[in-house]
Amino acid sequence: MNDYKNNWFYKTCSKQGGKNIVFIVVGVLLVLVGIMLFTAVISVLNVLLALFGVLMIVQGGKSMLFSMPKLKEQMERMSADDFASLGNFPPQPYYYSTFYFTERYLCAPSAYALIRYDKIKDIHANSVRVSKAGQQSVFVNIEFTDGRPSIDINIKDYGTFLKAPAEFTALVQQHAAAMMQNSGMF
């Protein structure tokens, strides 16, 4: 069994888990305020507060109850070589405030994603979504070779990313090629 709890990636994801606890607490408070306001007057604001609170609870709960345990299981099952390839410290640089590139893995702590380069089938590196409030979000969609469902990873520094999204795809391909070459698969 790997000592995943002392690994930099797991620790980074755990910090993200702390943010999710705050999401849940704030969500509960918003729901309570929304419900308490129902007793005085029923309005669109009450409903929106309550719905936003529920969404925050669901988002935080999903991460805490599903994503973190899934990551723990993945890290426990990793071979000793794969685990060692993550390194003892986060690699530099931290691309787009979202990704770390290690010897064998693309790491995205905000999505609890630890993705082996050789498991990546395709990358769609410029998926832009605009919310009803006009808020823009940029995602990278990663499809897998092993049949797992694709994953969308929200890019935190999307301004820099949008200037040259093809550079990200090229970086992933370079790391995948280096991994294949180092493992003798080339």
Image (cartoon, rainbow, N blue to C red):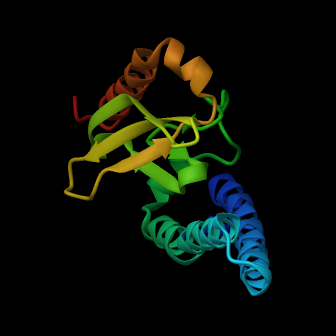
Judged left or right of residue 173, residue 102 is right
What residue is shown at x 74% (from left), y 78% (from top)?
41
Asked if one can make out residue 106 in the rendered structure from this viewpoint, the answer is: no
What residue is shown at x 80% (from left), y 82% (from top)?
40
Horizontal and vertical percent for residue 113? Answer: 49, 53
Which of 4/122 is in front? Answer: 122
Judged left or right of residue 46, residue 154 is left
Dividing the picture into quarters, in which one does residue 78 lie?
bottom left
Give the vertical position of 174 relative to 70 (above or below): above
Quarter of the image with the C terminus is top left
Judged left or right of residue 185, residue 130 is right
Horizontal and vertical percent for residue 172? Answer: 40, 28
What residue is shown at x 77% (from left), y 67% (from top)?
22
Dividing the picture into quarters, in which one does residue 79 lie?
bottom left
Asked if one can make out residue 104 in the rendered structure from this viewpoint, the answer is: yes
Which of 62/102 is in front? Answer: 62
